[in-house]
Image: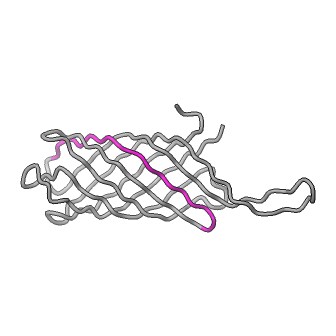
């Protein structure tokens, strides 16, 4: 059983798409940003910088969002790609400038990394690329601070569990 337990911290700029539910609440927002991928089982390559993109789709007159996302993190010869969908609850806040949200999601984790293998016939070591695909579940939360009507800054930590036996 292969497991990858990671924490992802995404810091993003959020741009609201021009599909307003009301003058203040868009039904769709695009998130673009960067962050760090921390793999506790990652050996010497535990921290990976990378990028994030997602599209938040708000249900009309509800504080529930669905968000398909994609992340790519790379360091040295290791590349990690996450993709899936989150469901968020965004409770009402007293301030229009700050909002909190929390939720869960599912998707896939794809990792490609270089490793050394020993050829059994020549007994020589050589490097090969290994790719593994894992199912993922994750918990996510965040705080979003509105800078202007269409721009926000957010911090979104995630706990991701990727496992080949999840079903």
Pinpoint residue 18: horizontal percent, then vertical percent. Answer: 15, 59
Give the side of residue 142 with respect to residue 36, left or right.
left
Q: Which residue is most to the left?
A: 23
Q: Which residue is most to the right?
A: 122
Name the chief secondary structure element in magenta.
strand
Give the side of residue 69 with respect to residue 5, left or right.
left
Write the start and end of the magenta stretch as one range: 76-93
Q: Which residue is most to the front?
A: 121
Note whether 87 is above or below 31 in the view shown: above
Quadrant of residue 70 in the image?
A: bottom left
What residue lies at 37% left-to-right and 44% top-to-bottom? Answer: 85
Residue 109 in the magenta stretch? The answer is no
Residue 88 in the magenta stretch? The answer is yes
What residue lies at 90% left-to-right and 53% top-to-bottom? Answer: 120
What residue lies at 56% left-to-right and 61% top-to-bottom? Answer: 47
Pinpoint residue 62: horizontal percent, then vertical percent. Answer: 16, 39
What residue lies at 49% left-to-right and 51% top-to-bottom? Answer: 7
Quadrant in which the N terminus is drawn: top right
Quadrant of residue 91 in the image?
A: top left
Give the side of residue 67 with respect to residue 119, left or right.
left
Number of on-image labels: 0
Q: Nearer the viewer, residue 127 or 94?
A: 127
Pinpoint residue 46: horizontal percent, then vertical percent. Answer: 59, 58
């Amino acid at each position: 059983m292969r497991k990858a337990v990671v924490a992802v911290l995404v810091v993003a700029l959020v741009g609201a798409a021009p599909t307003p539910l009301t003058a203040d609440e868009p039904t769709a927002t695009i998130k673009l940003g960067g962050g760090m991928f921390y793999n506790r089982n990652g050996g010497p390559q535990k921290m990976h910088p990378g990028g994030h993109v997602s599209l938040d789709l708000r249900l009309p007159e509800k504080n529930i969002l669905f968000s398909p996302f994609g992340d790519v993190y790379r360091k040295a010869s290791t590349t990690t790609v996450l993709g899936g969908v989150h469901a968020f609850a965004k409770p009402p806040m007293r301030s229009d400038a700050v909002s909190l949200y929390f939720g869960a999601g599912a998707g896939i984790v794809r990792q490609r990394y270089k490793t050394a293998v020993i050829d059994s016939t020549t007994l020589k070591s050589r490097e090969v690329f290994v790719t593994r695909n894992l199912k993922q579940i994750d918990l996510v939360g965040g705080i979003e601070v509105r800078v202007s009507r269409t721009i926000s800054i957010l911090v979104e930590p995630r706990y991701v569990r990727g496992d080949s036996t999840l079903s």
